[in-house]
Image (tube, helix red, strand yellow):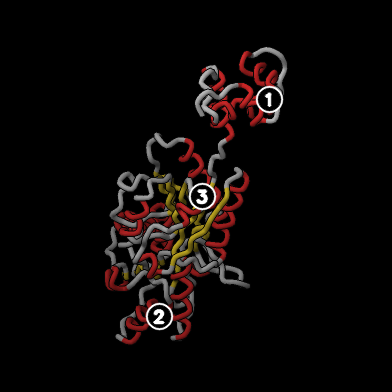
Amino acid sequence: MKGMGMSDIAEKVGVSRNTVSKVMNGRGKVSQGVRYQVIEAAIELRYHKLPQELYEEYMLTIKKDEKVSKNILVIATSPDFSSFWGHMISGITKELADREYSCFYNFLTFQQEKDFELPPILQEADITGIIAVNLYDKNAVNKLSQANLPTVYFDIPLGIDPMSVSADVIVVEGRRSVLKITEKLIEQGDKILGFIGDTQYCKSIEERWRGFVRAHNVAGIPIHNEYCFISKEHGHFYFEQQVEGTITSLIEDKQPLPQGFVCGNDAIAHKVIKVLRQHGYKVPEDIRISGFDDIPLEGEESTLTSVRTNIHNIGRRLAEQIVWRIDNPDRDYENIKIYGQVEFRQSTNKRS
């Protein structure tokens, strides 16, 4: 390209040599579009007399014109598309859309979570941030951090320091709420209580267990460990057979049932009530039950004492946080608690 001059630039752009001269010398009126084309052609043809200020102007324009990726990946393990997850996903999608971000979803089976690898979509869709929901495998969380992207978790596995995986965490407050439920049960005379929920796999259930324990300590009464199913060997109680096996074993061993079960979430509580009814027990006449999350059974008015949160708004809060984190990569990582409202209903109402 040696020896290229203004005539070559004019020919490439399809304008007169005089127009090219006006651009180079900054004299006369030339449309911004033609000006851009002339400078671009001069750079491509390696025109050595191109003024430095025109080169810098072109590079600044290029930078402004570059499309900034606004794609967020939501990774979730086996959401059952109940109203809980449906409302959360709706909230995430709505908030991101309002902020002109695109949303991609990657749903994992439990086995895929266990064998987790970084999904190809991270590169294929030019992802700029990640929201992780219901991801409780430590290996998966550690591998996800290798993506080196802004990340926000809804809850997190126990034993994972958010700082070590460079992430923000949003959780629903549980200790205070379950303390309040348990204190109410104790006050009405239900002092032999059990807890059902795996306290070893995620922060939220462990916090709810702490609230249960605290209520007993405050009341000065012992915890009945024979009715507390909290270890990993009992499973996470995702599946009905896990709950059925736990409750049935108590009944078949001819042990008296506790006066109440405080359950780690509504999904567990509904399963417990179903199994108890199959064995002829009535709630709350024979035993009191509480849950967490306030997810009513489809087509039924809820009678379950629970902790209500606006799940749609939690989804929006997750989206807000990931956008904030993208805009503020150097700010300290945050652990955010969202407080719910205890709703006392029939399932814990002891009848005299």
Residue 51 image position (x, y, % from top left): 54, 17
- First of labels 3, 2 by sequence position: 3
The image's mark for residue 32 is 1
- First of labels 3, 1 by sequence position: 1
Please tell me how crowded label 2 is: few (under 14), some (14-19), or many (20+) other residues with Cα within 10 Å. Answer: few
The image's mark for residue 241 is 2
Rendered residue at 35%/44% (across/down):
166
Residue positioned most to the front: 3
Is residue 53 shown above or below 118?
above
- First of labels 1, 2 by sequence position: 1
- As measured in the structure, the alpha-carbon distance from the residue carrying label 3 to the one carrying label 1 is 35 Å
Residue indicated by mark 3: 72
Count how many numbered circles sit on residues in the image.
3
Tell which of 120 and 128 is nearer to you. 120
Tell which of 62 and 69 is nearer to you. 62
Please, what is the three-letter code of the amino acid marked with disc 3? Ile
Rendered residue at 37%/77% (across/down):
242
The image's mark for residue 336 is none
Residue 250 image position (x, y, % from top left): 33, 81
Please, what is the three-letter code of the amino acid marked with disc 1? Gln
Tell which of 217 and 85 is nearer to you. 85
Please tell me how crowded label 1 is: few (under 14), some (14-19), or many (20+) other residues with Cα within 10 Å. Answer: few
Residue 41 image position (x, y, % from top left): 59, 29
Camera-near label (3 vs 1) is 1
* Element class at badge 1: helix
* Element class at badge 3: strand
Displayed quadrant of residue 182:
bottom left
